[in-house]
Amino acid sequence: MSELDTTGTPDSRGWEIPTIGGVDWQDNPDPVEESDPLGLGKGVYRSEGKVPRGFRPTASPQALEKLRQDYQHAGEQAAAFEQGKDIPFEVYVHVPFCYRRCGYCDFNTYTTMDFGEGASRENFANELIKEMELYALWQQSAGMKLKPASTVYFGGGTPTILPAADLVRMLTRVRQIWGLLPANLQPDNLGYEASTEANPDTVSEKSINELAEGGFTRISLGMQSAVPHVLQVLDRTHNQANVVSAVGWAKKAGLSTSLDLIYGAPGESVDDWKRSLDAVLSLEPDHISCYALTVAPGTKMGQRIAHGELETPRDDDEAHKYEIACEQLAQAGYQWYEVSNWAKPGHEDRHNLGYWRGADWAGLGPGAHAHAGNLRSWDTRHPKVWTRQVEAGILPWAGHEIITGQEAREEKLMLSLRLYEGIAFDELVSTIADGDVTQRAQAREQVNSFCEQGLLERFTDKSGQLRVRPTVKGKLLNDGMIEAFLG
């Protein structure tokens, strides 16, 4: 694609210069706690409820131009870093709307559907498409190639709160701007993947058919539990009958199906957890995710636990339930490929695999994170402020940063040691100790020690290369192992 359809008069870099001024773009003024996006089970670097504070610009022409220059410089640095590297490209779209906010959720979500000034569920697809165009123009102006997207992922929030036609329209615009990777360019010949998350009670046979006909290939349903009292504690609005119907419709439409489960909810017994696993396996989805409940202090559930209304999830209980999941899913023929994810052959979540393998991605929508080369950026969280920035013709970033060598090293360890494919033994040693011979020898001893302790296992890949990956015990103690490697 050589150019994008935009309104107004572009400057020399292809940007539209808006003629507005004096609009206060101040986002949430309260202090925001920084959180580690790698610690979240679902959607690494997706939209989070807690992100570092960044730019809070005023929309004067001078301020906008200064921001454009800053973003241009950051983009040029990222383009230089990418030079000569064949890095896959993905697209993540964050839809922040929910009918009801789950008590444990600390993602950037809202139950308000209309914030005024065009910031609404009804107008969301239009604004999101404008951000797509702004992001692609930024890539071009910085000297980056527009690569076909290997995956597109709609997360939330609840993307299927939007009409299926809106989701298809956004996917179609991705195809028009970047293209979608055709099957004959993929090593496994699978072509692109286009996924959407969905609550089981927000889809119908008609809407799922529209998604499939519009180019979607996969749907991820938030089942969470098959036990009514657990669903109630989690503030979920669906029932198991909704799940059964949604899976049936998706399979009939030809979509790859994924079901999410959460274990460790207050009041969930081991028998409850086994009941949920049995219910999932009876539906024979292509992919299953099992996430330990993480309770953030500022959430509704966190407050209920702090007040003694609910019991605190116990680490030993969650570890036992994880071991049960590993055993049952393996017996049913599902292969684990990431700490919290199992799939039938060819049905891995390739979008999230891209995160773990170091892909680039455009993160679009309120609060979404993006990654380009060695540049990380994050969008403004509040939909109304985000919409104002998009309407002004500026990338709606709240901030950005260049990833340092040390940060890249830490991410390499954290991500590769979550995967079944693991990491080459020598690469792990050099990542731990990028120094002299003595340091590398010590790192080698440390890796071997973790293998002897049963936290890591050595294996040889098809090319004969020695690699290591975590065992079940290592997956449970993953954080501590990485901390030890980082010293």
Image (spheres, helix red, strand yellow):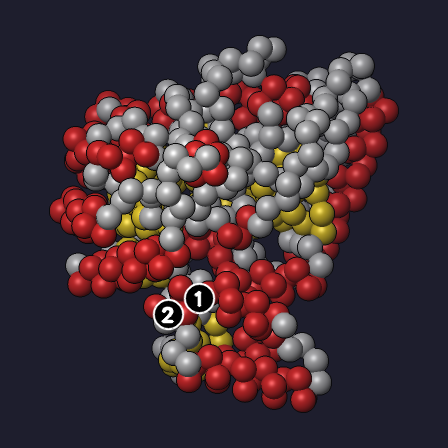
Q: Is residue 416 left or right of residue 55?
A: left
In the displayed image of the protein, which residue is found farthest to the left?
282
Q: Secondary structure at mark 1?
A: loop
Please provide percent x and percent y for residue 256.
Answer: 27, 44
Return the residue nearer the eye: 461 or 188: 461
Residue 473: name its quadrant.
bottom left
Label 1 sits on residue: 477
Who's the residue at 46% across and 79% down the image?
450
Q: Residues within 10 Å of mark 2 (few under 14, many from 20)?
A: some
In the displayed image of the protein, which residue is found farthest to the top?
116
Residue type, label 1: Leu
Judge whether 270 appears above or below 423 on screen.
above
Residue type, label 2: Lys
Who's the residue at 75% across and 29% down the image?
56
Judge whether 157 appears above or below 287 on screen.
above
Return the residue nearer the eye: 164 or 442: 442
State the separation of the CA atoms marked 1 and 2: 6 Å
Q: Is residue 438 left or right of residue 160?
A: right
Q: Is residue 97 visible?
A: yes
Please provide percent x and percent y for residue 252.
Answer: 17, 36
* The N terminus sits in image quarter: top right
Who's the residue at 39% across and 56% down the image?
315
Return the residue nearer the eye: 249 or 471: 471
The reply to whether callout 1 and callout 2 are in contact (CB within 8 Å) is yes
Judge whether 337 appears above or below 254 on screen.
below
Label 2 sits on residue: 473
Judge whether 365 appears above or below 184 on screen.
above
Q: Secondary structure at mark 2?
A: helix
